[in-house]
Amino acid sequence: MKRLGLLLVGWMACACPRTPPSSFSADLEDPRYPSARGLPGCVRYGPPQAMGTVPLVLTELSGLAASRLHPGVLWAHNDSGNAFQLFALDANGTVLATFSLTGATPRDLEDVAVGPCAPGERRSCVFLADIGDNFERREQVRLYRLPEPEMLLDGTLPVETLPFTWPDRPHDAESLIIDARTGRLAVLTKTRDSLGELFALDGLAPDTVVRATRLGELHAPEGVDHHSTAADLHPSGERLLVRTYTRIWEVRRPGASSLEELLQGEVVEVPAPSQAQSEAIAWLPGGRSFLVGSEFAGQHLYRVDCR
């Protein structure tokens, strides 16, 4: 992900003309951002608000996910080429704890999600997605699983490796989601042709290589965007945020009881800040706000709340 060509692509995408964050409040009924009546969470979003900055230890922030055990805490990690670590942050970017992870050597970590350790379990786990594959050559990719740390104290923790393969061919991917209701995991691919294909990861286990199941494909209206870099599923399962280099999209399906049903929903644009190499997005507890981050240390973290 850190190859010069990809950085230039991301920079060029972010440099495209677009409405700056400060103007979002100018038109309270901006047609770009339709209301979400009939869905849990915000009916309309307000403008992105700068919170803090990405800390220096996260020189290549690539994933954010809200903790289920620690209110106000987010789990974060770096992209490939960095130490295998998990960071606990607050929404202002303050590092609360750093955990060194053992038991695996990642190739390209791209996202993090928090949810039930397995379908039907009440325990909460952190899942790290080693799914990056710029040249689409990896025959096998994997997730790493560890129980959410109960104490926010620096330390060392082991991970379990959950390997899987694609059903067709290798894919590049940077987005991991989990359905908090069921513990079902899925990966959204990164492609130049759409917002990505969604693959379910059913039956993951440490000593078993499972095959992902293709559920469908997401498209921005009129095909105006692509290259998804992060995603997060709303606690209700009825809304899905998808981040690209230039925009944030939301998939909406009232009453969706599964990922398959959600994929049949409407894809709409929601307010997004202008960021260089934006690769992290996370719903905050309660599902009425979300946080986005850039891969560059020192860039702002932005929070979007209900209007």
Image: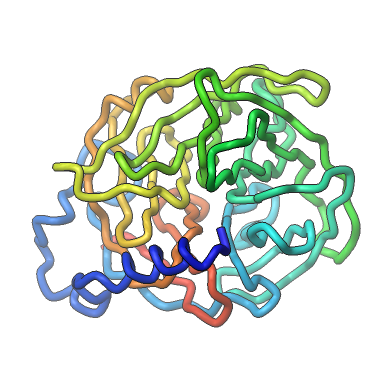
Question: Residue at point 74% right, 34% down?
Answer: 123
Q: Position of residue 283 (x, y in %)?
A: 47, 52
Question: How many labels sit on residues?
Answer: 0
Question: Residue at point 49% right, 59% down?
Answer: 279
Q: Quadrant of residue 14?
A: bottom left
Asked whether the viewer can see residue 76, the reply is: no
- Near-viewer residue (115 or 244): 244
Asked whether the viewer can see residue 12, the reply is: yes
Q: Position of residue 194 (x, y in %)?
A: 30, 39
Question: Residue at point 65% right, 76% down?
Answer: 94
In which quadrant will I find the N terminus?
bottom right
* Residue 147 in the figure: left or right of residue 184: right
- Near-viewer residue (102 or 254): 102
Colour mode of the rendering? rainbow
Q: Position of residue 19 (x, y in %)?
A: 19, 72
- Near-viewer residue (182 or 246): 246
Above or below residue 260? Residue 157 is below
Q: Position of residue 211 (x, y in %)?
A: 61, 18
Above or below residue 176? Residue 217 is above
Question: Residue at point 51% right, 41% down?
Answer: 172
In which quadrant will I find the C terminus?
bottom left
